[in-house]
Amino acid sequence: MRALKGFLAGALIISAAACNDLLDVSDPGSIQGGQLTDPALENLVVNGVIGEFQVAYGSYAFWSAVLADELFTDHTNVAVREFSLHNFVDLNDTNEGVYVNLQRTRQSADDAVDRLRTMLGAGFNTSISAARVYAYGAYAYTLLAEGFCDAPVNLSAPLPPEELFRRGIARFDTAITIATAYRSSQTVPANVAAATDIINMANVGAARAALKLGDLAKAKAYASLVPASYEKLALYSSNSVRENNALNRPARTADPYAGVHPTYLGLNDPRVPALATSRPGLNSNPIFPPQRPMNYVGWSPTTVQTIDITTNIKFATGLEAQYIIAEADGATASTLSFVNARRAVGNQAPVNLTGAALIAELRNQRARDFFLTGQRLGDLRRYLKAGVDMFPKGKYPVFTDFYGDKTCFIVPLSEKAGNPNY
Amino acid sequence: LRAWLSVAAIGIGAVVTAGTAAAQGGTITGRVTDAASGNPVVNAQVMVVGTSIGTAVDSDGRFRLTGVPSSARQVRARSIGYQPATATFSLATGGTANVNLFMTASATSLESVVITGAVGDTRRRAIGNAVSTVAASEVMEKQIVSNITDVLQAKTPGLTLIPGSGQVGTASNYRLRGAGSLYAGNTPTIYVDGIRVSGRSQGNFTVFGQETSSLDAINPNDIESIEVIKGPAAATLYGAEAAAGVIQVITKRGAPGKIRWEGRYEIGSTRWDDDLKPVNYGVATAARIADTVNFPGYKGLQVGDIISHRAMTEPNALRTGGAQKFSLSASGGTDRYSFFVSGVQSKEEGVNLNNFANLGGLRGNFSFVPSDKLNFSTNIDYSRHHVRLPLNDNIAFGLIISSYLAIPGRRYAYPAGLNHSQILPEVANTYDNQTRADRFIIGTTTEYRPFKWLSNRLRVGLDYNVGRAELYFPPQPAGLNPFSARASFEIDNTKGFLAQGRPINQDLTFNYDATATHDLSSSLVSNASVGVQYLSTIFRRTDSFGQDLGATGIRSIGSAAVTTSDEDFSEQKSLGFYAQEQLAWNDKLFVTGAVRVDNNSAFGSELNRVFYPKASVSYVISEEPYFRVPYVDNLRLRLAWGQAGNSPGPFDALQSYTTSVVTYAAGTQSALRYGSFGNPNLKPERGTEIETGFEAGMFNGRMNLDLTYYNKRTKDALLPVSVSPSTGFAGTRLENLGTISNSGIEMVLSGVPIQRKSLALETTLSLSTNHNELVSFGDDRAPIIFGSYAPSQRYQEGYPLAGMWAQRVKYNADGSLFKLPNGQPQIDTASIFMGPSVPTREMSFSGTLRLFDRIRVYGLLDRKTGHYQFNVKDWRRDRAGLSWETVNPAADPDEVLARKLASQTYFHIQPADFTKLRDLSVSLDLPMGGLKRYADRATITAAGHNLAIWTKYGGADPELNFNGGTSTFNRNDSWTVPMTKRYSLSLSVNF
């Protein structure tokens, strides 16, 4: 018995001492937070922001098109169906997916700023990495503002779009400042070009945010700095589903579920191409899947092409800057000239419009030129704010249901449940 | 197979024979029979009391013991399901004696030994908690079973089995005494001969619903019995991973005596009855009649005519699946050695043409007793499990949804067609998703008793399961292969696609127990036990994907033009110690107290250990002199209280980042990504249970009653707390917040109402209830609403976990349907609680009729009530206007409108009560006549499974779940095969 009691006592003592070595486990797929200030991880951190942005932008380009008037879906999934009907609640998975992607991009950019500041020390203010994460983060703020009714930032109370636009513009400004400082310190042409690229991207983004904030003068000021030929791409690849162009799957010929909204069918405009013959959607309803629009890389004005997994999207362009300048200028002769130049691209005869009609046509051309690039929802919202409601109404194209009244993405329940400010 | 077994058995038999020849002393012969019926007790073991001399009886219940010392006086027989029987004899040196033993059937034998969750004195009389034992070898004599689920089904009160599908090779969900956890799982921990084994999926690529199960790789023919302990009160000694109960599979062992062979051949078929398939209706409209290309079925009809078509009745849609199984085993031994070796080869086809489940296996159980103080046993099991699953369930290109939602008479575009809206059977049947798994379970146990008062047991074991999952699409022109998207990882596979997964699961068990017995006085005995248990689980999976395979027939990732890969890894370890003191007073009153302390790699960094106490009392009151209750032979009272845990997942506590990729013009680079939010304070859920009850034997063993009441409460229940996406992280993190309660009663009443020499009837009535309630979330959150098709289930305080909630259309105050200006109905914002999603009352009744000592007729009725099921099939068919309820000209048009409204579920969340004739079989022991010299016994059995259902449920079968058997809470009757009828014939020969 004495031996037994000894064993018993020993066992409990051993347990109290915690045999931690026996319980060591490995998690080879993870990085701990403390490692992320290592300067060797600078590229990893920057890549994280850009990678998240490209995923978020692709997702936003598709679903904002459904929430606007560019696309509709024929899908068996209830969440997709309700979202497509513009009649959804904060539990909706589709709505949540867009939110999560954009917030992850935004916060990864904000976190990256802090990490790069620690990693780079005094070099931060002349770092192209810092300029990049500011610029991409600013775009995330801008898209949140354009698409969402409101949105919090890192557990804050909900912020209205105007505040999100302002925060976006502030980050674009910082990106421009840092990239400019970096450019002035460089002599290698590639580095100078990289800095210029970020400056142009930030100017387009800042102009976009200012336009939708309603500050046309500021928007024009930024836009005027952008070369007409400038193009910034969101890049996609076949490497993984996450890196695919998000429009490829719903627009695929084999079993599509996204169709071009009747608003854009039959226009004979190569900028808004749809498959010539209908295909059955997932509920077997006939739909016309979208084809590669003008601001997708590889677009051809004469040949309709599919949207591939690897099709890149132009998300910031000199053309957009020109549109912003035209809108800021108003119904001027130069605006008419610009509109007719755009109509020519769409195989449309020139018009001679003035005043509100010209501005309406400018908006019409804008819708076609930036078809499926994530511009339309923000535009519809600002038009609605100005009293022009262009959101689809009435019967949904393929179901017996009718369109609801949602005009913006909403903060999902997952945010509200974990955010003490809700 | 037979050659392998023969070599093994003959080799071992030679040793056995040598051992037997060396024996000296007298000889005892005799027969062991059932006291009631006179039938032989074929599984009885006979031992000479006070010696290690023993043997198993033959198939006629006869035995022969040699080398018996003349000093021996008693021989004892034991068998599962019977009370031990003892007989005395006297034997002269070198003489012979004939002794017959008569055993009384008893489900509550006080002397039987409990293996699971007990140390010290492990006789049932000493255990304060309920332990259910399923005598699997007896089940196999009466039924023809496919897997371990068939063995357990409707035989253990408190164990709810929720099948996923009638497809073969798919998993069932196991739940003991209700759901005690939202997140940490409610599946019992599974042990095989003391070695913890994995119950997870075999790693199949998704078919969008069903899952395979590694438990199906256990050959039911190898199982002697299964013990089930149902909650924390019984499972405390298993620590932080046992709050959901423990199921222990005990495999067969050899017994001293001559080599016993058993061969068994089974053949069977399974089918989906036509009357369980729906009829789709279509109304002739002018447009349909005119469109003879797309609606050929409406040609010549008048507007308003109705045509119909029964789904899934086309050629190639389904088949009658065949099944066959061959198994062979040999067992034997001496008082120093014993062995059991077996092999099995089975093939089972499902009703889908691309569904099968095959199993091949070999087992060897060996025991060696070098001295009275020491014995070793080693169990080695190898199995190869091969399953092919069809695409089904929640996927647009499943065959069932394609058939159930097709407008009759409509020809859809290829790959769909006439009466198939998405896919034709011949195309669906090409879906090629196969999973193979090679599994080794190796365990060795050493028992050492250096002193009479001290016993030690060391057990080490490994469950190593290596899978190979494969999903293949040959190159096909665009549009011909419909599986190009959701069925194949969103990758365009018109050029061919191959996915290969290599899941490896490794469970290591190390267990040491020591028990010291000490007589504190003439009437008080102490059993003090200590033990340590170390468990380690590693799961590793590597997936490779290849696109553009070049040509049909190429099934090599290396040959693909584009390859990608993925990896998954998890590791979890636990270390636990326990100490137990058990006091026995006059072998009638047993008081036990114990504590276990655990640490686990999954605990948060702020937690080092948790303690789980237990206490129990067992009192065999019928052995008191004052106990005089008419007709009651024995009565034992039980009371147990205990705690056990349910640990979080391997890396749930860690906050971490991971890497992903970013696409650049020059290629892909690695990129940082948010991973898990984590929780450093994470700890296991704590289940506390009190159970009490009694076991009574009555009417001279002709009736036994076992009644238990339990009340189980889970605290610190792990709950997912939303991580606000605005933090960059997403999804959820776990916190210990909730409280969940379960209570109920369990009863088993078994009896022998008729016993004659030529006629005996044995019956068992089993009842159980469960009241489950989410007592508290622990925070002020709103109800959690979920559902695969509609918000049909909830976690809501004061209601059962995952209860069914319906959305109803809005009605006016006068009861008429509320309509919007466009004439459409509208959903009422209030949700209606319908009921639990799992049965709350279960009853089974089985009877075995024995005729003329040769014929056995067995039947099992299974009734489950108190729950609701979401009839998704009819919900969708109503919405599509395909059901009779929506096309019937006499139907209430407002009800039709309401049924068609997409968001309403009130009409389709339906009571799921049912009664099933689960099993019916007839067994005949063939007259051996002149064949007796070749075989001891031959039995032929004809059996049917799932033969009839009685239910008011609207669908074909409420007992299925598209989410698959591994899904904890989601319940949907959607696009999967209902439980099929199975007919089988077997021939079993003992020789």
Image (cartoon, helix red, strand yellow):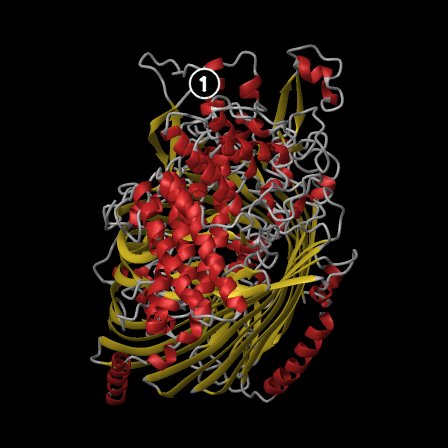
Q: Position of residue B755 (x, y in %)?
A: 49, 49
Instruction: Tell me where residue A412 sits by quadrant.
Output: top left
Viewer-side residue, B683 vs B261: B683
Q: Position of residue A326 (x, y in %)?
A: 47, 36
Q: Which quadrant of the rendered structure holds the C terminus of chain B?
A: bottom right
> x, y percentage for residue B778?
23, 51
**Which residue does the image show at 57% across and 87% down from the upper left?**
B23
Q: Nearer the viewer, residue B508 or B295?
A: B295
The answer to whether one can see residue B378 in this image is yes
- Label 1 belongs to which residue? B824
Q: Does residue B683 appear left or right of residue B210 in this picture?
A: left
Expressed as whole percent of the image width and height from the top left, the position of residue A171 reads 35, 54
Viewed as shown, does residue B138 lie left or right of B629?
Answer: right
> Image point 44% across, 85% down: which residue?
B71
* Residue B650 versus residue B951 in the image, above or below: below
Q: Amino acid at mark 1?
A: Gln
